[in-house]
Amino acid sequence: IYAEATAAMPDVIPPMPVDFSLLFNNLGFGSIEAMGISSKEIEPGIYANRSVALLNGDLTGLFALYGTKSTPATSFKAAEMAPADATGAMSGQLDLTALRDTASSVMTQVMGPMGKGMIDQQLQFTVPGTDIKVDEVIVALSGHWDIFWQESYDESFMPSYKGWLELKGAAGLIERLKPLAADEEMGIMVKETENGLIADFSGLGLDEGVTGLFIETDRKNDTVRVYTDKDWGPESEGPRLSSTEAYKSLAGKLPKKALLYAYTGGYDLDALFNE
C-alpha cells in the first residue's frame, strides 16, 4: 500500500526504505494473533465494551503499556474511592517504559544509530530547576495508578475539571522537586508533613477550568497523590461512584479482577443543548 501511495503521489509521500513488517513488530502488533471487539447496550445509555485478544507470546511494543502476562491483576479501587459525581475513573498498571522502549526501537529502525542517539539524548534531559532526568520520570511513573476525575460545563459551555490520582512508587522522585520552591517567581509552595511533603503548584497559572494543583507524598507507603481540590477525593463526604445506579448496572458485567479498569459516565448532550 505504501509503495503504491508513493508511486502515485511522490511529491506528497516521499519514498522511505522502511521494512513495514519489522515496524509493525516493533510497535507490538506482532504479539497479537487475533482480536475481537464488541459493544453492547445493556440498558438505555449504558454500554459494555469488550475486547478479546489471542496473544502470540507476551505483549510487546505499545501493547505492553498496560502490562504483560506477569503483571498482577487489580480490582477497580478507583471507583470505590471516587465521589459519586465523578465522570470517569481508572485503576490499573501503566508501564510508561513500554512507550520509551518502543520509541527507541522505531527510531533505531528508521534512522539507525542516529535515531537511537536522539532518543537517548532526550531521556537524559533534566526537569528544569532539578537534577531529575526524563528517563527517571518515565520509570517512576510506571506503576499502579488509581485515578478519577470530573468534567462539567456551565451555561456558556465552559468546562471545569477536578481530578485525583494515586501512584505507587514515586514518592522519592517527587521529593526531589523541592528545589523548585526556592525560585519565588515560580510560585511553588512546599510544606513538610509527618510522612512526606505537600507541594502547591496552584500559583503556576493553570489552564482555565482548573482551580488548583497539589502533589502530596507518603514516604511510608511510597505513594504520590496528585489532586486539584482538597475537598474532593477519597476522604470527602458523600456517596461513592461505585454506589451509583449507573455504575452498578455496568459493574455487574465486569470481571472481579483485570489488568486495567476504566469507566466514563459520558455526557447528556441533549440536556446541555436544551439549556
Image: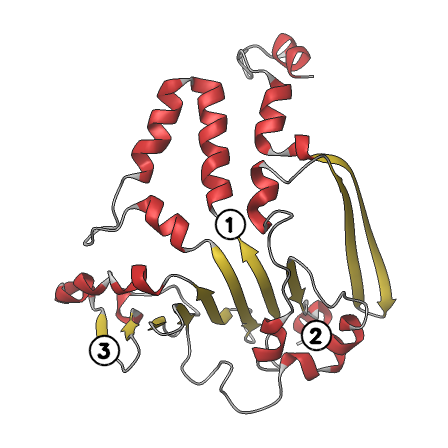
Kind of residue indicated by mark 1: Asp
Give the residue number, with chain letter if any, for mark 1. 95
Label 3 neighbour load within 10 Å: few <14, some 14-19, many 20+ = few
First in residue order: circle 1 vs circle 3: 1
Vertical side of 173 occupied by 234: above or below: below
In three-dimensional space, the C-alpha distance between marks 2 and 1, rounded to whole angstroms, equals 38 Å
Along the horizontal axis of the image, is 150 left or right of 101? Answer: right
Which secondary structure lies at badge 1? loop
Q: Where does label 3 land, which residue?
A: 192
- For label 2, the residue is 271
- Mark closer to the chain start, 2 or 3: 3
- Location of residue 238 (image quadrant): bottom right
Residue drawn 76% across the image and 72% down it: 251
| Image spot of residue 179 (x, y percent) | 17, 62
Picture colour scheme: secondary structure
Amino acid at circle 3: Glu
Within 10 Å of disc 2 (Cα), the crowding (few <14, some 14-19, many 20+) is few
